[in-house]
Image: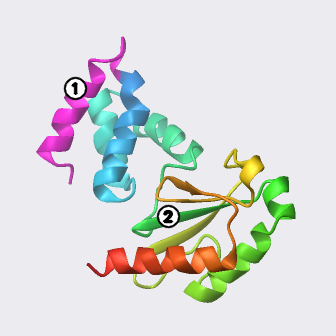
Amino acid sequence: MISLATRQRFDELVTRYPEKRSALIPILHEVQAEAGHLSAAAIEWVAGYLSLSPADVMSVASFYDMLELEPVGTHMIYVCQNLTCAMLGAEKLIRHLEGRLGIRMGETTPDGKITLRRMECLAACGAAPAIQVDGEYHHQMTPEKLDALLDTLQARSNR
């Protein structure tokens, strides 16, 4: 389930903190990066590794939006729904994405490549509307820019 290389990174991570349990969030990120999401088995394993209860680990994993408890797409697209982005066309972008991909916000394409999510704020009001794709910000988005971005993602996925 969790590779030896990832476990070795855990051993290094815990040395950075005065208490082993303080490495919980970075460790959850590592597990998610490797497995794609935090399964129940992964939660149990991390709990055992850090001498925590599974409930303690789950309380953290379920609190943060950037931690996934269910499988998600290879590519994550977050659309900012903050007031500024909404006023400058975020809903139009959402409808365009849903139409182009054939899914609704919160869903993943049938091929498992793209998951769409709303984000309360991407802190990019000066360049609204904004989206984030795989951790990379894209500003002053338009449906045309979205199409080009989706074409790029699909080309990357077909390699």
Q: Which mark is residue 12?
A: 1
**Hey, which residue is sitting farthest left in the picture?**
4
For residue 57, above or below residue 86: above
- Residue toward you, 104 or 97: 97
Q: Position of residue 138 (x, y in %)?
A: 59, 59
Q: Position of residue 117 (x, y in %)?
A: 61, 65
Q: Badge 2: how crowded within 10 Å, few (<14), some, or many (20+)? A: some
Magenta residues span 1-20
Q: Element under label 1?
A: helix
Q: Position of residue 22 (x, y in %)?
A: 41, 22
Q: Is residue 3 left or right of residue 32?
A: left
| Residue drawn 19% across the image and 38% down it | 7
Marks 1, 2: nearer the viewer: 2
Q: Element under label 2?
A: strand
Quarter in which the N terminus is drawn: bottom left
Amino acid beneath label 1: Glu
| Residue drawn 64% across the image and 82% down it | 98
Quarter in which the C terminus is drawn: bottom left
For the stretch drawn in magenta, what is the main secondary structure?
helix
| Residue drawn 26% across the image and 32% down it | 49
- Residue toward you, 101 or 1: 101
